[in-house]
């Protein structure tokens, strides 16, 4: 399977969200990445249910909702009702992670867990077989436009090995600082999904940026 691309609307112009959605919908991108921040789990607030509800009818592509909020299990049904297809919560926000994952699946969505740059991927071992996706954060969550943290390459390799060892089918999604300079290497190391905010929406030609990130040139792989 070739990798999937999930542009993040966090980097779009919010006064023209319908244009951002039309761009993604008419492009080779696969999912719409939707970043929800509560000003508590992360030091920033983005948007919530009304925005998700309003963008839902603008695309047939899955809404890949990334919750950067405390107590995410309180809102699982509400995100499903707003139109989320995938719901990912942070391991650092969930004391009863196994139960939270089951709640997402019972609500009829694909279940994901995100891990911060400081969290060891081995902490996912016991839930990995239950997951549809893992978001490996390659920046500290809270803001778009940050620099990719280089140790994420090593974490990705570890996670790929752990996935095989646990016979998990979870997709591995890389989130933060992804662009044409590292996309090919991430895919070569086993990333299944690339999230791209700034590298799509701040590009002079977002359509071309999406095309490039879907087929990143191999010569850009650096060690
Ligand atoms: C960061 C968010 C990311 C963000 C990525 O907290 O989870 O999804 O939108 O933005 P870029 O691609 O600009 O790093
Ligand atoms: Zn995200």
Image (cartoon, helix red, strand yellow):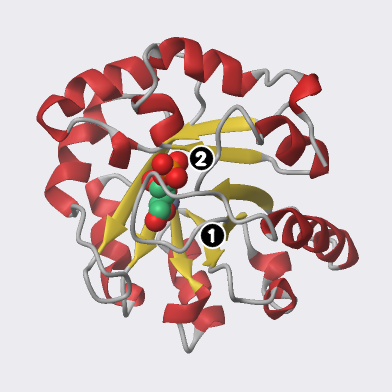
The quadrant of the picture occupied by the C terminus is top right
Residue 64 appears anywhere in the view: no
Mark 2 vs mark 1, foreground winner is 2
How many C-alpha atoms fall within 10 Å of the one at disc 1: few (<14), some, or many (≥20)?
many
Residue 198 appears anywhere in the view: yes
Instruction: Kindly identify which numbered label has been placed on residue 160.
Output: none
Q: Quadrant of residue 5?
A: top right
Q: Residue 91: x and y, percent? A: 52, 76
Residue at image x 42%, y 28%?
61
The quadrant of the picture occupied by the N terminus is top right
Q: Residue 220: x and y, percent? A: 74, 25
Q: Is residue 90 above or below residue 173?
A: below
**What distance separates the C-alpha of mark 2 from that of mark 1?**
14 Å
Q: Is residue 28 above or below residue 42?
A: above
Task: Identify the element where label 1 is drawn.
Answer: strand
In the foreground, 82 or 154: 154
As drawn, is 201 to the left or to the right of 133?
left
Residue at image x 55%, y 39%?
178
In the foreground, 143 or 166: 143
Task: Identify the element where label 2 is drawn.
Answer: strand
Q: Is mark 2 within 8 Å of ligand 1?
A: yes
| Mark sitting earlier along the chain (2/1) | 1
Q: Is mark 1 within 8 Å of ligand 2?
A: no
Residue at image x 50%, y 62%?
105
Q: Residue 29: x and y, percent? A: 50, 23
Q: Is residue 82 above or below residue 155?
A: above
As drawn, is 58 to the left or to the right of 127?
left
In the foreground, 145 or 87: 145
**Residue receiving disc 1:** 112
**Residue receiving disc 2:** 195
Residue at image x 15%, y 36%?
54
């Amino acid at each position: 399977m070739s990798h999937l691309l999930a542009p993040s609307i966090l980097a779009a112009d919010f006064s023209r969200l319908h244009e951002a959605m039309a761009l993604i919908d008419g492009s080779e991108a696969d999912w719409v990445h939707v970043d929800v921040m509560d000003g508590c789990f992360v030091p920033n607030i983005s948007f919530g249910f009304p925005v998700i509800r309003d963008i839902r009818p603008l695309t047939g592509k899955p809404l890949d909702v990334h919750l950067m909020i405390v107590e995410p299990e309180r809102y699982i049904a509400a995100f499903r009702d707003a139109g989320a297809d995938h719901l990912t919560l942070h391991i650092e926000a969930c004391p009863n992670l196994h139960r939270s994952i089951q709640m997402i699946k019972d609500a009829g969505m694909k279940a994901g867990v995100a891990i911060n740059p400081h969290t060891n991927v081995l902490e996912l071992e016991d839930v990995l077989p239950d997951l549809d996706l893992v978001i490996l954060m390659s920046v500290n969550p809270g803001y778009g436009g940050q620099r990719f943290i280089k140790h994420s390459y090593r974490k990705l390799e570890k996670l790929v090995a752990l996935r095989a060892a646990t016979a998990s089918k979870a997709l591995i999604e890389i989130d933060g600082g992804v662009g044409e300079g590292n996309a090919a290497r991430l895919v070569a190391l086993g990333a299944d999904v690339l999230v791209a905010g700034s590298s799509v929406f701040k590009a002079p030609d977002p359509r071309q940026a999406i095309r490039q990130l879907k087929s990143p040139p191999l010569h850009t792989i650096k060690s």
